[in-house]
Image: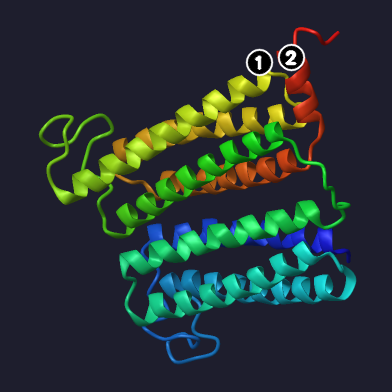
Amino acid sequence: MKVKRQALLTIILTYILVVFGGYVASSESGMGCGPEWPLCNGLVIPVLKGDTLIEFAHRVIGAVLGIMTAVLYFRIQKSNPVRKLDKASKVMILLLLVQILLGAAVVWLDLPAIIVSVHLMVAMVFLAVLIWIWRRADEQPSRTKTRKNQSIQNKFKVVLHLLLITLLLGAYIKHQSFGLACSWLECTNGFMPVSFPEIIQTGHRLAAGFLAFYIFILTYLSLKNRWEAGLQNRLMAASLLVLGQIIIGILIIISYIEISWAVLHLAFGTALFAIICEAGVFASSSSRISRLEEKSSNPYYG
């Protein structure tokens, strides 16, 4: 199996693990194996029912992902001499080890919100590294970079930082049970938050609002400046996911945090993060973007 295909399968399994982790949290099954790790209720294979089945399934998926990541690492070391890819594979392994330790700490310390939230953030960075490896696995190194390419990459970096902040606040809100601190439109005392839960909830919404606005602007710029069609399509998909996230966010509050809506919210958020990551790598390797921007902005072209 080639490195590129192995990386893609690892990306898919990482996505499944993140979303299933959201289901574990939403169904309050996180302690289904008790305060034990790596054993589950004192057993290697426990009685599989209820919360134990859900939590153990999550651990099994994580173990399979760990094996696939190790295989991917050794494939890269064996088959690809590109220095950047080698460095990315080492970062990938380091993030995997950090995730394992955080996963153990989450269980040992009885699901502390801050550690669970950091656990999700590391998973997102791990996913981003996998996407970079997948996109660059068979790519020939290019030394041609332009200011416009760099400018576009910087815009995607802004989006990714906003996404991480939004996801971090969302995870913390979820695990601190602050989800209903405000209604879908206002907080207890009007539009201005007063209590700590309301402030955190409002901060999450403001970050999400800035994120949505920025993605919509980027999509508009990609169409106006005639960036490469592949990048336009990625940004339009991201905009659709943002619209879906807004609707799902409202439904979560209206339904008093129905499990299905909460899990779907995380699924959309993770998919949005993956698309933006991939689009950023795509933009960094596309020379046509710069040429099209120059052509559209230069009156002497044509």
Q: Position of residue 75 (x, y in %)?
A: 83, 73
* Residue in the foreground of this view, choosing between 49 and 87: 87
The residue that disc 2 covers is 296
Of the 4 image quadrants, the one containing the C terminus is: top right
In the rendered structure, the answer to whether residue 295 lies left or right of residue 196 reads: right
Element carrying mark 2: helix
Circle 2 crowding by C-alpha within 10 Å: few under 14, some 14–19, many from 20: some
Q: Position of residue 173 (x, y in %)?
A: 31, 53
Q: What's the amino acid at mark 2?
A: Ser
Q: What's the amino acid at mark 1?
A: Lys
The coloring applied to the image is: rainbow
Question: What residue lies at 53% left-to-right and 45% top-to-bottom?
Answer: 160
The residue that disc 1 covers is 224
Q: Is residue 55 above or below residue 35?
A: above
Q: Is residue 251 visible to the viewer in this orientation of the structure?
A: no
* Residue in the foreground of this view, choosing between 68 and 86: 86
Q: Is residue 85 above or below residue 276?
A: below
In the rendered structure, the answer to whether residue 5 lies left or right of residue 251 reads: right
Cβ atoms under marks 2 and 1 closer than 8 Å: yes
